[in-house]
Amino acid sequence: MHLEKLMEPVPMELVLPQQWTLQILTQDYAATGRYTFSQISGFEGSWTDAPTTWGNDYFQNLLNFKWVLTTSPAGKPQWKPSNPTNADEAKLFMLTSDIALLHDPMNSYQKIVRQFANDLILLNTVFAHAWYKLTTRDVGPVSRCVGPMVPPAQPFQNPLPAAPLPSALPQWDQVRAAVRTAMSTVSTAISPDMVNGKPYYGAMFVHLAFACAATFRRTDYLGGCNGARVRFSPEKDWSVNVGLSSVVEVLRPVKTKFGSGLMWTDLV
């Protein structure tokens, strides 16, 4: 982690469009360390003395130095070591948000800081998982990730169970008959509609099937009836799906009867 000058853009009303040229920007950055149309935030320093090298120095520095509140040359509050032993350590700094990790009243963040400071392998592992999730969370199922370095499906990718072998599939005529029976059999999970004086769950089954498909989000390929995730949070908790868990329970005897050969996706 490294910071020489935290920069932010100047408000657009202060910038003339014709001034945005690569030549000007390049010349200004080479001369001053920042571009013409940016302004430094006022914080200056480096979190570690090896900012271009990956490691757990940041967490070790948090623990190994006593940090005191100072003011940057631009008048911004930042933290510096009170006892630097060389010039590199004197350049170290922390923001208040960094120091806050050491003052969690629940002692949760302090524990994490100590773990990462003492175990680089643990930091590597946790960071790798977090980075992979950050960069692929909206991609959808693992099948949409390509390349030789794709890891096994992660929980956040909602991996589906293996499809049953053809020999394990149920007789679909028997499944249809069981659904028809469930459609007209009173369940304790939810009261049925009454049609001509007889119990009827058909409309609820159609509603469940439509809602299951309607959970699909094109933005991140989540939801949909592949996996029947309308049975789980967060889909089942959406206001539009309130009550559908009870309809699922009406179908549960059918699922129990045919076991693992009948997938909830097909049943719904």
Image: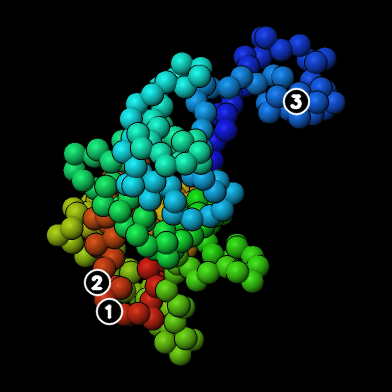
Q: Residue at left 24%, top 38%?
A: 103
Disc 2 residue type?
A: Pro
Which residue in the protein does label 1 denote?
257
Disc 1 residue type?
A: Lys
Q: Residue at left 80%, top 15%?
A: 19
- 235 above or below 254? above
Question: Which secondary structure lies at badge 3?
Answer: helix
Q: Position of residue 228 (x, y in %)?
A: 40, 61
| Tag 2 near tag 1, CB within 8 Å | yes
Q: Position of residue 26 (x, y in %)?
A: 79, 29
Q: Residue at left 27%, top 47%?
A: 110
Distance from Cα at disc 1 to Cα at disc 3: 76 Å
Q: Residue furthest bottom?
A: 167
| Residue 145 in view | yes
Distance from Cα at disc 3 to Cα at disc 2: 75 Å
Disc 3 residue type?
A: Ala
Q: Position of residue 68 (x, y in %)?
A: 33, 30
User: Which disc, if any, is residue 31?
Assistant: 3
| Residue 99 in view | no
Which residue is at the front of the view, 177 or 235?
235
Which residue is at the front of the view, 179 or 163?
163
Q: Residue furthest front?
A: 85
In the picture provided, is 166 more to the left or to the right than 184?
right
